[in-house]
Image (cartoon, grey):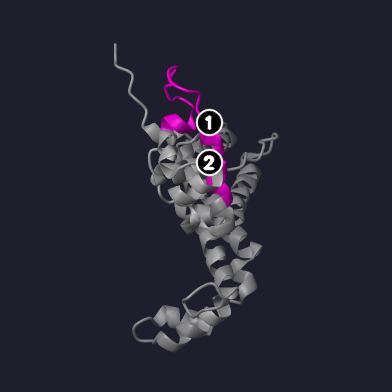
Amino acid sequence: MAEERALPPVVARMWGREAVSRHGPRPSLDAARIIAAAIEIADTEGLPGVRMSSVASRVGVATMSLYRYVGSKEELLTVMADAAVPEPPELGGLPWREYLVTWTRANRDFLLARPWMLLVARLTPPMGPRSLRWLDRALAALADTGLDAGERVNVASTLGGYALSEATFVHGMSSERGGGGDAGVVGMAEYSEVLAEVIDPEGYPELFAAIHSNAFGDDAEWVGDDDFTFGLDLLLDGVETLIARRTTA
């Protein structure tokens, strides 16, 4: 009989699988309060504000007391990122493509609502109950398409990555507009103007032509819904082609 593998501590914490000690005094604190406090700090101050000392101060304990509940700051970030994920959209009998449009848009939107998650989302693959519920719903939407399990996971991962990259781009451009950036660029129009100054036709012939034909468009085109939908349709058209290929085979 194979031995049961011990879960990594951070995974055990997210899934409530930690061993509970029956000895000693009753804890005056719990992980849920710590995570909620960390999320509040991240929402108001951004991720740099989340320090073990600041979280401890928020819940009214000594910093070292937190390590009874979270092993490190990295673990805290992983756990709080999963806890901050909302519930995925309900399937509601929608066709797979319509549901995945809603799913990807909702994924992008909750990342934009909490920009600090854009950084944490890149640290680890989804391992917590909330983030994995999103993956489960995407797989369920594709269940009757003829794609195998690995293909469905790849589709969901690709769409999740698209949501993350789009949210990162939109947040970056919005930050520049708000004066929070330091790149010296404010919006796509200014970005195009900067490129026009440095791109030469010999080294970058196609990019030079694209810039001077206004291919980058205005700000609204690049950070608005049309751009998001255009890219998403490209991805879903590919999925639809793959499904048709599997059906024919």
What residue is shown at x 40% (from left), y 49% (from top)?
A: 123
Residue 159 vs residue 54, the one in the foreground? 54
Q: Position of residue 199 (x, y in %)?
A: 41, 84
Q: Position of residue 4 (x, y in %)?
A: 33, 19
Q: Is residue 39 magenta?
A: yes
Judging from the image, what secondary structure is the residue with disc 1 in? loop
Whole-angstrom CA distance, mark 1 to mark 2, is: 15 Å
Q: Quadrant of the image for the N terminus?
A: top left
Q: Nearer the viewer, residue 213 or 13?
A: 13
Outermost residue to the right: 92
**Circle 1 Cα neighbour tier, 10 Å, few/some/many (<14 / 14–19 / ≥20):** few
- Magenta segment boundaries in residue numbering: 11-40
- Is residue 48 positioned above or below 140 on the image? below
Q: Is residue 179 visible?
A: yes
At x 55% / y 52%, what residue is drawn? Answer: 41
- Residue 85: which quarter of the image? top right
Q: Which mark is residue 28?
A: 1
Circle 2 SS class? helix
Q: Indicate left or right for 127 with 224 as reference.
A: left
Residue at x 42% of width, y 18% of height: 23
Q: Residue at x 56, y 69 (%)?
A: 175
**Which one is in front, 91 or 241?**
91
Q: Residue 17's image quarter?
A: top left
Closer to viewer: mark 1 or mark 2: 1
Q: Position of residue 226 (x, y in %)?
A: 64, 64
Q: Which residue is mark 2?
A: 35
Amino acid found under the numbered disc labelled 2:
Ile
Label annotation for residue 144: none
Q: Measured along the vertical axis of the image, is residue 166 above or below residue 26?
A: below
Asked whether residue 90 is drawn in magenta, I would say no
Decide if residue 164 is in sight here. Answer: no
Q: Is residue 175 above or below residue 60?
A: below
